[in-house]
Image (spheres, rainbow, N blue to C red):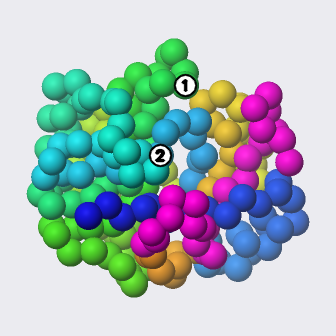
Amino acid sequence: MFYYPNRPILMPPDKQTIQNLEDSGSYIAEQKFNGDNITYKTSEKEFWNRDNTKSRYRATPEVQKELNKFPKHSDINLELMHYHEKTLKNILIVHCIMVLEGHTLLGKTYEDSRKIIESFKYGEHVKLSIIYRKNFWNLFEQADGTITEGIVLKRLNGKIQFSTSPLANVPWMFKVRKPCKKYSF
């Protein structure tokens, strides 16, 4: 079965709103990369796009070796850095685990999922997303518009949800992008 990954709500880049979320102590920030959000199904060793279609990406033997460290019957939400930037190939950034050894994390919190993914070993190609607990606006300002597009803010106690639609947003996650050629607010 395919579970659509949690999708953030698009939020305008407003410094005060971002500061308020940081000051609440309930949110963390991650860099928003210019990649493809995909799900890796460990048992099938397949990559799936957010719209429930198989990804054209095929892991190199080095990447597959790193992916083999995840438990069987698990679905891992990743950012694939391969097609958008010529200097970055075969980089997978792990955001969340949605299914662990055949059991969904439905109803668990983002923080629960984060603790699980932090327990795995990472390497040169498969990397854990870095979380930030302060200086959200500075992190947003550092986005270059090429490799990084902005930030994603996640409430630690936000509940993992699954949807039957690839467009369904969750109320506890916000994407803040910098304006660029292909995108503006």
Instruction: Write the residue at 72% across / 53% down.
Output: 176
Contact, mark 2 vs mark 1 (Cβ under 8 Å): no
Which numbered disc covers residue 134?
Answer: none
**Label 2 to label 1: alpha-carbon separation:** 12 Å
Residue 185 located left or right of residue 36:
right
- In this picture, which residue range is highlighted in magenta? 162-185
To which quarter of the image does residue 98 belong? bottom left
Residue 6 point in image, percent of width and height: 49, 65
Q: Which residue is mark 2?
A: 37
Give the quarter of the figure containing the N terminus: bottom left
Amino acid type of the residue that numbered disc 1 sits on in the rendered structure: His
Question: Would you say the magenta stretch is mainly helix, strand or loop?
Answer: loop
Instruction: Write the residue at 18% across / 43% down.
Output: 45
* Residue 128 visible in rendering: no
Q: Which residue is mark 1?
A: 84
Residue 120 point in image, percent of width and height: 23, 55
Instruction: Write the residue at 15% across / 48% down.
Output: 44
Amino acid type of the residue that numbered disc 2 sits on in the rendered structure: Asn
- Where is 159 relative to 96, above or below? below
Residue 60 point in image, percent of width and height: 22, 24
Residue 177 on the magenta span: yes
Residue 6 located left or right of residue 92:
right
